[in-house]
Image: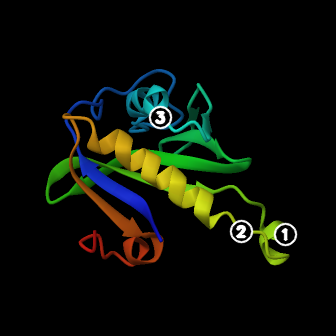
Amino acid sequence: MRTHVTFLSDAFNRTEERENFINPHCFGEDLARWVIPRFTDPHLKVDPEPCQEDWGWEVFVTCDGKSFSIGIGPYERDSESGWLCFVESRLPSYKKWVGATDGSEQRRVCAAFHSVLASAPEIRDIRWHSKESFMKGDADDG
């Protein structure tokens, strides 16, 4: 499943470090705040406040009772300033061990996120990747 997305956009802050950043270069807050109100799928509940991590930001989404996070951080692609976002399940490991799944809900979150990105003129060159291929460094498979 393709859960990692890269795209290009000059519309969001990648240069001005803010006082509230946990670490320098912890960009993505304005992108996270831009994304949150744009989800329109009635099956999704989106937390109105993003959460800062030491590497970027997260947006929390619930789909039909299953929880996900969308990680957001800066990413360089082809010498251009871009963004990497990834949709991750928050299903506890012990539930996975007993056979619980959330794949269909994760696909729905990815599809809704894609709609948000694809409908924005300030977003370009959207590429979706599987986690496995992206982590191997094959960012051109999207």
Q: For mark 3, does the 10 Å Cα neighbourhood hold few (<14), some (14 to 19), or many (20 or more) residues?
A: some
Residue 39 - label: 3
Residue 101 - label: 2
State yes or no: discs 1 and 2 in contact (Cβ < 8 Å).
Answer: no
Tell me the distance, in whole angstroms, between the alpha carbons under discs 2 and 3: 23 Å
Secondary structure beneath label 3: loop
85 versus 103 height, above or below: above
State yes or no: discs 3 and 1 in contact (Cβ < 8 Å).
Answer: no
> Quick one: label 1 or label 2, which is nearer the N terminus?
1
Q: Position of residue 90 (x, y in %)?
A: 69, 55
Q: Is residue 127 left or right of residue 39?
A: left
Residue 94 - label: 1
Q: Residue furthest front?
A: 42
| Quadrant of the rendered image containing residue 52 | top right
Residue, x 43% and y 46% (percent of image)?
113
Q: For mark 1, does the 10 Å Cα neighbourhood hold few (<14), some (14 to 19), or many (20 or more) residues?
A: few
Q: Amino acid at mark 3?
A: Phe
